[in-house]
Amino acid sequence: MLNKKSLKDLDFAGKRVLVRCDFNVPLDEHGNITDDTRITSSLPTIEYLVDKGAKVILMSHLGRPKGEPNKKYSLEPVVKRLGELLNKEITFLQDDKVVSFDVKDKAASMVNGQVALLENTRFRKEEEKNEEEFSKDLASLGELYVNDAFGTSHRAHASNVGVSRYLPSSVGFLVEKEISIMGKALELPEKPFVAILGGAKVSDKIGVIENLLNVVDSIIIGGGMAFTFFKAKGYEIGQSLLEEDKVQLAGELLEKAEKVGVKILLPVDVVVAKEFKNDTEFMTVNLNNIPKNMMGLDIGKKTIELFTGEINKANTVVWNGPMGVFEMDNFAKGTMAIAKALAESKGTTIVGGGDSASAVEKSGFAHRITHISTGGGASLELLEGKTLPGIEAISDR
Ligand code: AMP
């Protein structure tokens, strides 16, 4: 399936290995890491390389420092957490320029099994431009390159794509796992295959729906995006989220689905609220009864039953996007119920990253999901059937 080199295809002993990780972790206002999933997901690759006697030089971005050094986005908290998780001292090659003579000297004198981390690659404006000189400079630190940053693989930046032009490369264990699980679901799914789409915008998911129509048996649509479909079907949607310019397209997608025999399930009842906040008046109404002055913020009970029934029948389930405004407790029930349905499914269950991943974490069912992706944007692009530049750049087998 994946025609790219994997870790087992290269000999890392005694070599300086440049590894692109995705350490883009959420931080609170004091700079504490609030979710270290992305760091723990990188451990298998790092431990493997240490075990093989490599000199491991890690790189990552964090947040959006906009091409300039900014202490707020330093990778220092990651150095600390990674050291705790690996039970090993991590050398922080801290430098506002990311690569410098000093960093090059230190990298050159590393010993086998040592692990070092560069400063945030986005401290340099050249990073997101995939600029040649910066890519070369980064590549000069290593002799081999490993891409294990699934979360950034839909971007072509210097630290994930640029460096690959100058070094023999492979994907890491995390990228391999992410691609093979999603790849298998899309290429050889065990049927019935159900996709669940939610979230705020239809526009973000058009490509996904179009591509999924070729592979799935049914698509469940919830969240804010459902209301543009309701509008296309002629329903009153009150103050609910609407993408006026996508109404026609939503109608066309429904027609196309019917033509190709893919069942589309939309909510049959919704929780409507007076205002977009948790503490406001709310009630559940049938789809044909949405009051003009209220907005739909979650799916109702009957919809939960309908969607759960469909999920129960599936052997493959892919979920991307919450069913409602799950950040507010009063409107989180639909999303939590879907997380529970996935947890209880007998089939393969895959959750795209981003909001659906945090919703599943919040539900307490994360450990009962087959795979939770570490990359929201990247997994969406896979669902759209696109190739990811960060993977494409890796040496072929
Ligand atoms: P996305 O980034 O497109 O996956 O959208 C996720 C966001 O959609 C979350 O922050 C949810 O609060 C929001 N969302 C889900 N359902 C609704 C809804 N019915 N109305 C407004 N926002 C919603």
Image: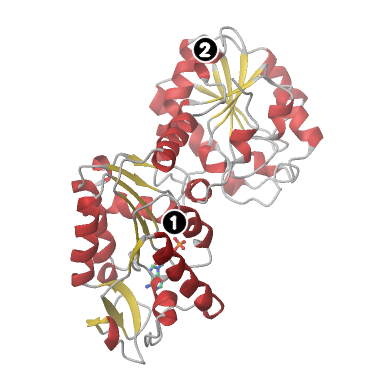
Of 48 and 93, nearer the camera is 48
| Residue 177: quadrant of the picture | top left
Residue 79 % position (x, y): 50, 32
Disc 2 vs disc 1: Cβ atoms closer than 8 Å?
no
Looking at the rendering, the quadrant in which ligand 1 lies is: bottom left
Residue 154 % position (x, y): 59, 44
Find residue 2 and name its label.
none
Query: Dot 2 corresponds to which residue?
Result: 113
Residue at horizontal 57%, vertical 40%? 153
Q: Residues within 10 Å of mark 1 (few under 14, many from 20)?
A: many
Q: Residue furthest bottom?
A: 292
- The disc labelled 2 sits on which kind of residue? Gly
Does 115 sit above or below residue 339? above
Q: Secondary structure at mark 1?
A: loop
Q: Is residue 182 left or right of residue 163?
A: left
Query: Dot 1 corresponds to which residue?
Result: 213
Which numbered disc, 2 or 1, marks the residue closer to the eye? 1
Q: Which of pointers 2 and 1 lies earlier in the amino acid sequence? A: 2
Instruction: Tell me how far mark 2 sits from mark 1, CA to CA.
Output: 48 Å
Residue 23 visible in the snapshot: no
Residue 174 % position (x, y): 46, 31
| Residue 299: quadrant of the picture | bottom left
Does 137 sit above or below residue 292? above
